[in-house]
Amino acid sequence: MLIALPLLIWGYLGIMIFTDAFRARMESQAAALHIADLISRNTETITDAYLEGMNDVYDFLTTRNSDTRLRISSVMWDSETEEPAIVWSYGTRGLPSLVDLGGTSTPPDPDGEDQTGFMLPVNQLPVNDLANRIPTVLPGEAVILVEAFAMWETPMTNFAGLRLLEGRRLDPLAVTRPRFSPFIRYEHDNDFFPDGEVEFPPIAGEPSGPEEEELPEPEPEPEEIVTIINTDFNTGAPPRLVA
């Protein structure tokens, strides 16, 4: 009993902790995919208030009371630098955007040493190796990138004083293409589109300019032929052609 009981307790607690961790990770990933799908269906310019509301939807989908943040970005292909370019980016609830961070992994300067959760600078950084974790962005397309961040704590935190895996950051990614428009416009994306219009580079193998389609010539209408038949029902004579 002295040998087996500690192993059984360790196994029981381990099952509870890792099962809850994987369930939280699955919920976070599924919620991020739903958020990306909702944003991809927009045909009008989205606002800061709309993106902040997406964080509330994310909290509702995850059904957890943990601290969460979203970073929503639009990524296009830059033909000059031959690499993906950030069109616009926004972080909810004060989270720095990819534009504010400059795409680097340098943490912002902390205001104090007693910061926890998302106030900790390391939890405000992008996902490591972000460019290689998203699908390849093709020329002429703009994708929506949703980075979801949730702080997970073990269910054993308030049980027997065990603080295992405390304050772990979950950071699922979700990438999708716009469904009803070639790109998603944002109210503060004028720095990237100063004229308010977007010109996509031509895709390889396709003509650079639009071609006018030749309309087929209208077919002539057939002449109407009227046939008049005279039938005498009194004499029983067969019908005869009049005109």
Image (cartoon, rainbow, N blue to C red):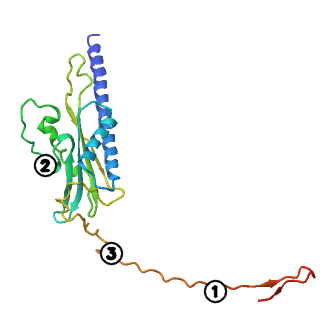
Residue 164 image offset from top left, x and y in percent: 21, 25
Q: Is residue 145 above or below residue 1?
A: below
Residue 49 image offset from top left, x and y in percent: 25, 45
Q: Residue furthest right?
A: 235
Quarter where residue 69 is shown = top left
Q: Are marks 2 and 3 in contact (CB under 8 Å)?
A: no
Residue 28 image offset from top left, x and y in percent: 30, 38
Q: Which residue is mark 2?
A: 100
Q: Residues within 10 Å of mark 1 (few under 14, many from 20)?
A: few
Q: For the residue marked with disc 3, what is the amino acid?
A: Pro
Q: Is residue 75 left or right of residue 41?
A: left
- Of residues 206 and 227, the one nearer the viewer is 227
Whichever of labels 2 and 3 marks the residue nearer the N terminus, that label is 2
Q: Find the distance from the CA under tag 2 to the CA under tag 3.
A: 38 Å
Identify the secondary structure beneath mark 1.
loop
Q: Which mark is residue 223?
A: 1
For the C terminus, the quadrant is bottom right
Q: Are marks 3 and 1 in contact (CB under 8 Å)?
A: no
Identify the secondary structure beneath mark 3.
loop
Q: Find the distance from the CA under tag 1 to the CA under tag 2.
A: 73 Å
Q: Which mark is residue 210?
A: 3
